[in-house]
């Protein structure tokens, strides 16, 4: 079996020793060729070329952004294997893979030998596929600010701490204290401050702690949509409690500040002004209109 291992050498948990270890484990089950990314979007290109050149599986050693690029480079032609090379690595965790890269590589080697895989329905925003979530507004603005600090080398603290700090700054500015997005799904139209579409639970993690924004979301159904109608600074602690402690977003909390939909196929957004968007924690640029829907062809993941 021929396998292409796509490596992001600048991912937070990737180095030459980790790469060699992963390669050694995978070579127990397959003939492996390595391709390293050198620019944004390169992983998509490498994945497409890999499928065209007859590779029977694509393994990714990188973070959630690299995994998302591969997801957008291929459809369901071949299975994808994920090694948790990023700081959060949401999708490998959601698939139940070990947090250790060597252990995850051993698991994927077994999956390659046994043909063990899971088909996952995928979400899309304006055609861009996402595995576990996308967002328009506040969370995407935070992703952009944190990513900018990483790229310029300004980040010196834990990404989770930086995320929380930047979230607090943006909420304090008041931009999301009133609705600026018109959301339409089915026969319902709402005015909301920002939107998060969830394809899988957990939505994300703080260290080892899962964040169950929409714990009812499943890979076999539609999308769960969480859309706060406003977000003042005084609302942040209550929102965090529901996110981390009691998960009432998906259990009918009755909170008038938050709109919630379960298992929907299509959501249309119209922003009053261009708002930032993110896919799987990666900056997607600004959007004015957005169509969020389900790509039912999905993807195949090795487990």
Image (cartoon, grey):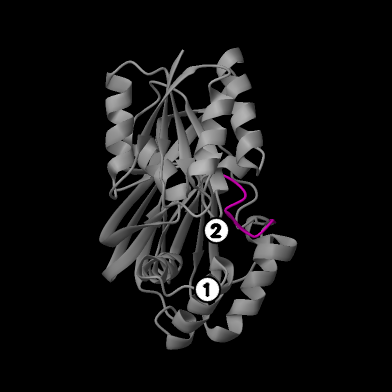
- The residue that disc 1 covers is 162
Alpha-carbon span between mark 1 and mark 2? 27 Å
Residue 302 picture location, percent across and down: 55, 26
Q: Secondary structure at mark 2?
A: strand
- The residue that disc 2 covers is 260
- Range drawn in magenta: 200-208
Residue 97, placed above or below residue 226: above
Examine the structure image and report whether residue 202 is included in the region drawn in magenta.
yes
Which numbered marker is on residue 249? none
Q: Secondary structure at mark 1?
A: helix
Residue 233 picture location, percent across and down: 55, 85
Residue 275 picture location, percent across and down: 31, 68
The chief SS type of the magenta part is loop
Q: Quadrant of residue 154?
A: bottom left
Residue at 44% x, 80% y is 170
Residue at 52% x, 81% y is 168
Q: Residue furthest right?
A: 246
Residue 215, placed above or below residue 162: above
């Amino acid at each position: 079996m021929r396998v292409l291992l796509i490596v992001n050498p600048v991912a937070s948990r990737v180095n030459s020793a980790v790469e060699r270890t992963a390669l050694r484990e995978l070579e127990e089950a397959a003939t492996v060729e390595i391709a390293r990314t050198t620019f944004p979007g390169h992983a998509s290109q490498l994945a497409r070329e890999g499928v065209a050149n007859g590779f029977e599986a694509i393994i990714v050693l990188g973070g959630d952004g690299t995994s998302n690029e591969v997801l957008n480079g291929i459809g369901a032609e071949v299975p994808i294997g994920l090694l948790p090379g990023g700081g959060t690595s949401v999708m490998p965790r959601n698939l139940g893979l070990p947090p250790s890269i060597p252990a995850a590589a051993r698991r994927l080697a077994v999956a390659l030998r046994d043909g063990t895989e899971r088909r996952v329905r995928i979400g899309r925003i304006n055609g861009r596929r996402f595995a576990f979530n996308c967002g328009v507004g506040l969370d995407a603005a935070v992703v952009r600010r944190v990513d900018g600090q990483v790229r310029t080398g300004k980040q010196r603290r834990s990404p989770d701490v930086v995320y929380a700090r930047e979230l607090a700054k943006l909420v304090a500015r008041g931009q999301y204290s009133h609705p600026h997005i018109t959301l339409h799904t089915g026969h319902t139209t709402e005015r909301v401050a920002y939107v998060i579409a969830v394809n899988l639970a957990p939505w994300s993690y703080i260290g080892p702690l899962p964040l169950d924004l929409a714990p009812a979301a499943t890979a076999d159904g539609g999308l769960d949509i969480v859309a706060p109608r406003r977000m003042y600074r005084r609302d942040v602690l209550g929102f965090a409690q529901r996110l981390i402690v009691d998960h009432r977003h998906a259990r009918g909390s009755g909170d008038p500040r938050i709109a919630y939909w379960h298992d929907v196929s299509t959501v249309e957004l119209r922003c009053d002004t261009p708002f930032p968007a993110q896919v799987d924690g990666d900056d997607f640029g600004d959007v004015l209109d957005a169509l969020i829907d389900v790509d039912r062809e999905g993807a195949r993941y090795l487990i």
